[in-house]
Amino acid sequence: MALDTKIWTGPGRPAVFLDRDGTINEEVKYLSSPHQLRIIPGAAEAIARLNKAGIPVIVITNQSGIARGYYTEDDVQDVHNYMDKLLADHGASVDAYYYCPHHGAAIVKKYALDCECRKPRIGMLSAAAAQENVSLSQAYMVGDKRSDLRAAVNCGARGILVRTGYGRQTEEELLREAEATGAALVTNIVDDLAAAVDQILNQIAHNHPQSVKAPKFASNYRHHRPEIGQHYPHQ
């Protein structure tokens, strides 16, 4: 079934939330500079396919390196600006970036928060859903870590684990736990972002054969990181 290239608005509007490190770009522990950024092969093209289908692409990333004093929020902005450039070379773009700079053991005291935005909590996802006019129940969360999968469960989205980054390690942990407890492994696991997008587009085309209005994004949503922290309401 072909997917209409227009987009949904309102409560049923789908979106794809992406973890950053290990999902879009190669894993670098505490990535702090554009010079360290390498896009995983096929990831940019996968994002371009979501763009063409009119599906919002929103990056949701924990960045505790800010709290630990390894780099600054300006450094994160520089990395995202360079990521935009690399993606644009493949006709791809991210609609909005959300990041959590907090950590309970922060060296930089202003970021020492037990916040609601750090995955697996859902503060970033909830804020993005409201500001980007998307439905969490119709959304997908793609990542390489357990925190990404738990965040998906916690907000009612559909989680997909990729084997890039820490994904194979996460998969092995889940398999060991399933064997030890006898529980069924229900996690959706694919090789990479390209395979995840294949699955997502097939499911959306099946569930939403018709769409409505073209997307309208406010420019100030770009690279937005809401001041949610510990005050964001629990859900």
Image (tube, rainbow, N blue to C red):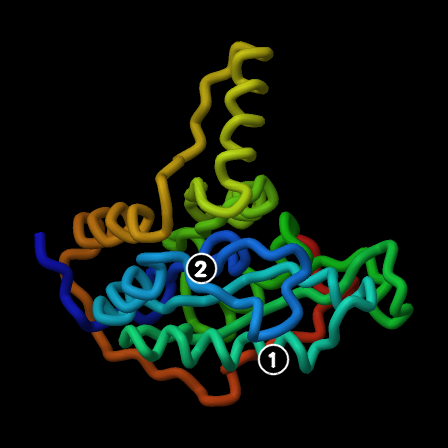
Q: Are marks 1 and 2 in contact (CB under 8 Å)?
A: no
How far is disc 1 from disc 2 in space, using C-alphas?
Answer: 16 Å
Residue shown at the point (55%, 34%) measured from the top left:
169
Instruction: Please determine whether, in this image, residue 180 is positioned above or below residue 119.
Output: above
Say which of 118 and 206 sits in front.
118
Q: Residue furthest front?
A: 35
Residue shown at the point (59%, 61%) measured from the top left:
61
User: Of marks 1 and 2, which one's residue comes earlier in the chain?
Assistant: 2
Residue 108 occupies quadrant? bottom right
Residue 79 appears left or right of 25: right
Label 1 sits on a secondary structure element that is helix
Q: x and y percent of residue 230 in the render?
A: 78, 62
Say which of 37 and 114 sits in front.
37
Within 10 angstroms of label 1, few (less than 14), some, or many (20 or more) residues?
some
**Which residue is the site of mark 1?**
77
Disc 2 marks a residue whose amino acid type is Ile
Q: x and y percent of residue 125 in the render?
A: 55, 60
Q: Residue furthest left?
A: 1
Label 2 sits on a secondary structure element that is loop
Q: Residue furthest bottom?
A: 219
Within 10 angstroms of label 2, few (less than 14), some, or many (20 or more) residues?
many
**Which residue is the site of mark 2?**
24
Instruction: Please determine whether, in this image, residue 73 is positioned above or below residue 194.
Output: below
Residue 189 occupies quadrant? top left
Residue shown at the point (14%, 57%) measured from the top left:
209
Residue 58 appears left or right of 146: left
Q: x and y percent of residue 109 in the render?
A: 91, 68
Which label sits on residue 59? none
Q: x and y percent of residue 77 in the render?
A: 60, 80
Residue shown at the point (71%, 64%) measured from the top left:
232
Instruction: Please determine whether, in this image, residue 198 is positioned above or below residue 49.
Output: above
Disc 1 marks a residue whose amino acid type is Gln
